[in-house]
Image: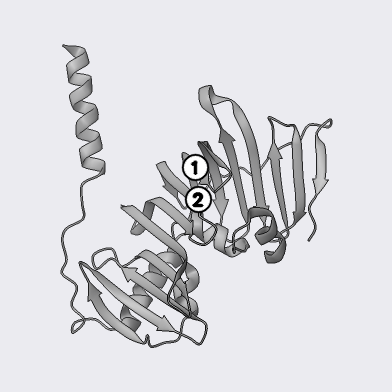
Amino acid sequence: MYGCISIIVFLAMVLFSCSPAPRVTPDTDRVTPAQLVSSVHENHGKKTSLKARGSISIESRDFSNSGNFNMDLKHPDSLLVRIRGPFGINVGTVFLSQDDFVFYNSMANEAVIGEARGDILRSFLRMDVGVDDIMNLFLGSSRALFNEPRRPDEFTVDGDQYLLVFRSHDSIRRYWIDPYYKVVSRVVHSNADDRPVMEERYDRFTESNGMVMAQSIRVIQHEERASFSISYSRIDLNARDLSFAYSIPSNAKVIEWTD
């Protein structure tokens, strides 16, 4: 009897946490692109820190792995991710600041350290990202929209989302914006021939203290056939009890990564 009650309570919690937002029909006659971007920017600017836990996975043509993690983030200064494998085994630690990065693999007792420069991060991660990109990714946001021209080349409705399209001589960028939460739900970066190069997906939005946060985040590198996914199980936005303390064993092999 008690087991059945527990199952019912658990299912109710799952259904409640996954309940969809009220349906809002997008209407390009009632809102301008500038107003949408302003709303997205306002929500993004409210998020200054994050304490969270969840699961993370990385997939590529020759590598695939996943694990659970605990994370502390202070934007835009510091990010500490503690990754655990099955049975709570400590797998590794990732620390990133505006100046340095550290990737410690506890299974191999090996640490990779280097300067947090965009070219080195791209070479090491094999993804076209910089420090700010990684920080914003974990915050469930894409800053790319804020660097676009004031007026998009196209402003339409695609299904139940607003769609903003920006074109330049070498690329096309598409942004889908949720009409209820006023946040970016998807970004597709394409080349001049309109072939997708990179895609960002943000889903399962939740509201906390007047802020909207994506609980599911995925980045896809189409040409490299690689992806990076985050699924949050617990989120504490603008948390104050952050900790960025970590240690590397004195007998660990240390590799200095340079490009």
Contact? badges 2 and 1 (CB < 8 Å): yes
Q: Is residue 150 visible?
A: yes
Q: Position of residue 179 (x, y in %)?
A: 24, 68
In the figure, residue 39 lies in which quadrant? bottom left
Amino acid carrying mark 2 in the image: Phe
Neighbour tally class for label 2: few under 14, some 14-19, many 20 plus, Cα within 10 Å: some
Determine if residue 208 is in view. Answer: no
Taking depth in this image into account, of 259 and 114 the one nearest to the observer is: 259
Q: Nearer the viewer, residue 59 or 129?
A: 59
**Residue, x 44% and y 53% (percent of image)?**
218
Q: Is residue 19 above or below residue 156?
A: above
Residue 131, x across and y down, in percent: 62, 61
Q: Secondary structure at mark 1?
A: strand
Name the mark on residue 28: none
Q: Which mark is residue 56?
A: 1
Left or right, residue 157 beside residue 209: left
- Residue at 82%, 41% (x, y): give it: 254
- For image coordinates 73% across by 36% down, the residue present is 247
Residue type of the residue flagged with mark 1? Ile
